Image: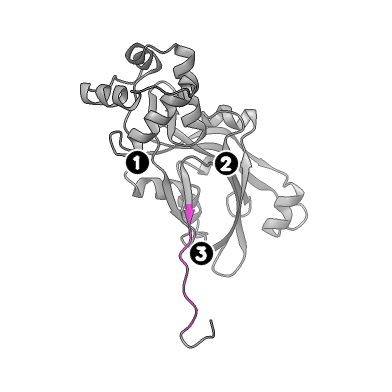
Amino acid sequence: MSAPGPVPAKQEAILQALAGDDPTPRYLRLAGALARLIESGVFQPGDAVPSERDLAHLTGYARVTVRNAIDALIRSGTLSRRHGSGTFVASRIEQPLSVLASFSTDIANRGERPGSVWLSKEVARPKPQETMALGLAPGENVVRLIRVRTADGEPLAIECAVVPAAVLPSADLIEASLYAALAERGAAPAHGVQRIHAGLATAEEARHLGVPAGSALLRIERRAFLANGKPVEFTVSAYRGDRYDFVATLKGEAMGQPS
């Protein structure tokens, strides 16, 4: 199903943004025009933009030209494509680095519907990195959970979460939220450590996230601990770089310290 066409005022705004002689390739002209309309507020975050067919009809450009313009704006993070729904102005999500919260809780607090597409869930022998991160003894198993995390049906991240089987003996105990399942067993994480670095989406990651291969990702490695310091979670995630900003609160130096 294509996104709904623009109202007449937005049609006129697009045509005005494209007016005038410009030797720039047509797909770049269209991409620039749409970007300016988004920056000026004609299109708001979350708004649907016209479909490729509607834009081609409105501008007289070839469909491939329109597609190249839309793809360029998706790669830059200006637009977001939702399979089966259309193309929308991207709204970035700010997640504070100082708060240890589950994905489900964070998305629900923003008024959106959290969801998951399960790729695998199993009880298994830990990998060497998982053994070290969780401080496991020889012979201990883990529950490994791999899923695509969504908000209102839009894929935002791929997450591989691993917890000791001694804490959570069955993957079937997980419904929507891992942290909720841990809390029910008296093992809610009390604090954690995260490492973040930039990366590019592989072909498989791009397929799951609905973005072009090579799109920017934020790769996050998190270790969470119980109040007594015992590791309870090791999670590696790949978040869409066009949708997420991770924000840290900084404090100034103490008064009286030399500058």
Near mark 1 (Cα within 10 A), the count class, few <14, some 14-19 or many ≥20, is some
Amino acid of disc 2: Leu
Q: Which residue has dot 3 on it?
A: 190
Q: Which residue has dot 1 on it?
A: 112
Q: Secondary structure at mark 1?
A: loop
> Label 2, label 3: how many angstroms apart (C-alpha)?
27 Å
- On the question of residue 241 being in view, the answer is yes
Q: Residue at x 50, y 56 (%)?
A: 185
Q: Residue at x 57, y 41 (%)?
A: 217
Q: Measured from the top left, where is residue 14 in percent x and y?
A: 31, 25
Numbered disc total: 3
125 vs 87, nearest the viewer: 87
Mark 3 and mark 1 in contact (Cβ < 8 Å)? no
Near mark 3 (Cα within 10 A), the count class, few <14, some 14-19 or many ≥20, is some
Q: Which residue has dot 2 on it?
A: 217
Mark 1 or mark 3, whichever is nearer to me: 1
Amino acid of disc 3: Ala
- On the question of residue 170 being in view, the answer is no
Q: Measured from the top left, where is residue 173 in percent x and y?
A: 51, 44
Q: Earlier in the sequence, mark 1 or mark 3?
A: 1
Q: Measured from the top left, where is residue 215 in percent x and y?
A: 57, 34
Q: Earlier in the sequence, mark 2 or mark 3?
A: 3
State the extent of the magenta-drawn residues as a range: 246-254
> Label 1, label 3: how many angstroms apart (C-alpha)?
25 Å
Q: Residue at x 47, y 75 (%)?
A: 252
